[in-house]
Structure formats: structure tokens, C-alpha cells
Amino acid sequence: MHELAITQSMLDIVLEQAEKARAKKVSNINLTVGELSGFVEECVQFYFGFLAKETLAEGATLSFTSVPARARCQDCHKTFKLKEFDWTCPHCGGNNIEITAGKELFVESIEVE
């Protein structure tokens, strides 16, 4: 359910920027989403359709760019792509890792008319 709050915040940012640009319409919203963000695209699409009604963003397309989950082993200092359900270092077998990518969630850009 956190997608509702996230979608509202995203829409607030988009509308604020569109108004600053004196846009008449928002046609596309480009979002960057990390694999570990817990973000469900289908829910955001649904909430966006509801929340954007009668705003400059009504009818805008949402485009999603996914960021793979990556980590750095604190023991051997190598970086690697995280696998679902396996967060051990594939190089040394350690589990002392730091997440370096995949938690992102932000509005990358908007396209306006």
C-alpha cells in the first residue's frame, strides 16, 4: 500500500516542475526504480491513473527504468549482482555485504508540452 503515498509524492514533484516550466500538459514521466525498492509498477500505474485525474499529468505515460541490485563484499572488496534469496558473495562466500545499487526510487525526468 506504500505505492499510494509514493505515487502521490511523485505526482506532487511532477506537477510542481511542470508548473515551473509553464507546461500545458505532462506527456511522459520517466522513473528510475531499484529492484530492492519494493515498488510494484502495476500498483503505481493504477494509483497514478486515479490521482492524476483533472491535473496536467492526466493521461501521461509512466516509463520505468529498473536498476539491478548490486552489492560490495566488505571482506574481499569485490562487487557483484545480487541474486534473489542468495546474498552471499560469489567470490569468497562471505555475507558481510553492503548494498551499492537497487534501492533507488526517483523521478528521472518529465516530458511536457
Image (cartoon, rainbow, N blue to C red):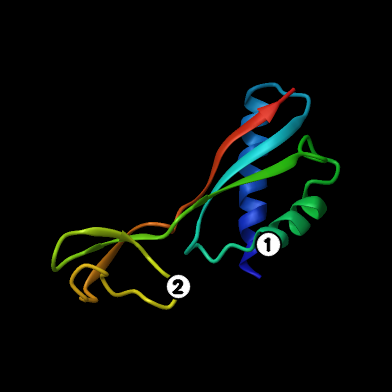
Q: Quadrant of residue 28?
A: top right
Left or right: residue 63 compared with residue 85: right
Q: Residue furthest front?
A: 91
* Relative height, residue 57 to residue 38 (above, below): above
Q: Which mark is residue 84?
A: 2
Q: Nearer the viewer, residue 4 or 69?
A: 69
Q: Residue at x 70, y 21 (%)?
A: 22
* Residue found at x 78% / y 24%: 24
Q: Quadrant of the N terminus?
A: bottom right
Residue pointed to by mark 1: 4
Mark nearest the camera among 1 and 2 is 2
Within-10-Å neighbours for mark 2: few <14, some 14–19, many 20+? few
Which residue is rendered at x = 67% and y = 53% of the image? 8
Percent position (x, y) of residue 65?
A: 56, 46
What residue is drawn where x is 66% and y is 39%? 29
Q: Name the kind of residue labelled 1 in the image.
A: Leu
Q: Amino acid at mark 2?
A: Glu
Quadrant in the picture for residue 107: top right
Residue 14 pos. (x, y %): 64, 38
